[in-house]
Image: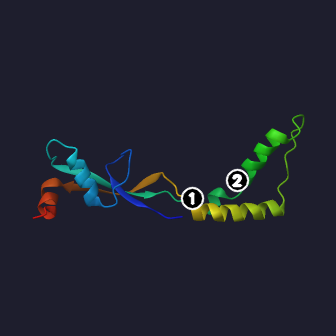
Amino acid sequence: MKVNIFYGEDECQSLHCETMDDAIEEILDGSEEDPVAVEICKYRTLEVSKKFLEGRILEYCLEFLDEEFGNYESDDVTEITQKMKEAEQAFINALLEEYQPWQCEVIEKKIINVAEWRKNNTQT
């Protein structure tokens, strides 16, 4: 699973800036006049742990199957077998390799003085 880093305003709805400078430029491009300062957050995509998934996938799957195909007159549930556990582990490994979370968490916040930033980032 790849961890992505993005930059943007606090609680922004769309993260796509991969550098702090890009995020600042985007904020300033949307402003009629420069603010004194802007707060920029560094975000990291959340990681899904193996521990979080273990047991859940198989349990949810069997519960679904029992509801759809089990004996509706009984409270019996399908017992988890060793073969099922092994298959779940293989599936979890594939998920962790391929799944890309979308949700992010703030890992750093900075207040950027806009005048200083413009002075240091003006292209001549």
The nearer-to-camera label among 1 and 2 is 1
Disc 2, SS: helix
Left or right, 120 with respect to 1, comes to left
Residue at 68% across / 59% down in the picture?
54
The circle on residue 57 is 2
Q: Position of residue 99 (x, y in %)?
A: 57, 58
Residue at 85% across / 46% down in the picture?
77
Residue at 34% across / 48% down in the picture?
10
Instruction: Name the residue beneath numbered marker 1.
Output: 99
Of all residues shown, which one is farthest toward the left?
A: 124
Are dots 1 and 2 in contact, CB under 8 Å? no
Q: Position of residue 124 (x, y in %)?
A: 9, 64
**Taking 4 as reference, is 32 above or below it?**
above
Left or right, 117 with respect to 52, comes to left
Disc 1, SS: loop
Q: Position of residue 25 (x, y in %)?
A: 23, 54
Residue type pointed to by label 2: Ile
- Comparing 32 with 43, the one in front is 32
